[in-house]
């Protein structure tokens, strides 16, 4: 029989898709208020993987990823998704989103996104939010799954998440060493 245990905390990230670069500082400020300081931010790049958002947000969309410094419990993913939905609403115009924020987390074994849409590979987490298993780690790298969105399965995204996993490993190791050195003497 296994003994229940709390898994290590994870590093949260956000994918931010937008058209109006003038909104980005305000969006980032709200994300920092929610998840803490940004460790890494990717350069904005054209979002070319799907036209899904164009009807609502227009053409010429850009995307950047933000990785947050603070370690957070995985169980926070539903509440983080609800809060990022609120941020999207703040920046909406005439009930149309002008920014799309997809939060998720990087752990040693996987990359998980939060979504409001259920599907066969998505586990219900509570509060109307599902966890989308997006990438799994094995044989030294993250790997896309049959249902992984093409942008997350791209070689660029895999390289990004592999790098973030390495940073996360160092943070976990540092936190573990700090706990060990501050323990009973």
Image (cartoon, rainbow, N blue to C red):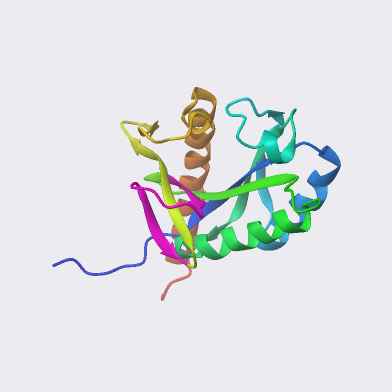
The quadrant where residue 59 appears = top right
83 shown above or below 110: below
Residue 138 or residue 95, whichever sits in front: 95
Residue 111 or residue 87, whichever sits in front: 87
> Is residue 174 visible in this depiction of the protein?
no
Measured as percent of width and height from the top left, residue 25 is found at 81, 47
Magenta-drawn stretch contains 120? yes
What is the quadrant of the N terminus in the image? bottom left
14 shown above or below 35: above
Residue 8 or residue 180, whichever sits in front: 8
Specify start and end residues of the magenta stretch as a single range.
Answer: 111-126
Which secondary structure type mostly characterizes the magenta part of the structure? strand
Measured as percent of width and height from the top left, residue 76 is found at 51, 64
Q: Residue lying at the far right in this picture: please name it.
A: 22
Residue drawn 38% across and 48% down?
A: 119
Measured as percent of width and height from the top left, residue 83 is found at 64, 62
The quadrant where residue 100 appears = top right
């Amino acid at each position: 029989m296994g003994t229940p245990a709390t898994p290590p905390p994870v590093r949260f990230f956000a994918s931010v898709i937008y058209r109006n670069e003038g909104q980005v500082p305000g969006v980032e400020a709200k994300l920092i208020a929610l998840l803490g300081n940004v460790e890494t931010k990717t350069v904005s790049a054209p979002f070319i993987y799907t036209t899904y958002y164009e009807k609502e947000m227009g053409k010429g969309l850009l995307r950047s990823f933000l990785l947050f410094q603070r370690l957070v419990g995985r169980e926070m993913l539903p509440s983080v998704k609800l809060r990022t939905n609120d941020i999207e609403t703040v920046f909406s115009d005439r009930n149309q989103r002008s920014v799309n924020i997809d939060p998720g987390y990087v752990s040693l074994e996987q990359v998980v996104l939060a979504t409001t849409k259920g599907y066969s590979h998505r586990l219900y987490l509570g509060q109307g939010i599902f966890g989308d298993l997006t990438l799994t780690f094995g044989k030294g790298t993250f790997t896309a799954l049959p249902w992984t969105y093409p942008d997350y399965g791209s070689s660029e995204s895999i390289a990004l998440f592999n790098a973030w996993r390495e940073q996360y490993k160092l943070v976990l190791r540092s936190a573990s060493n700090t706990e060990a050195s501050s323990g009973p003497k």
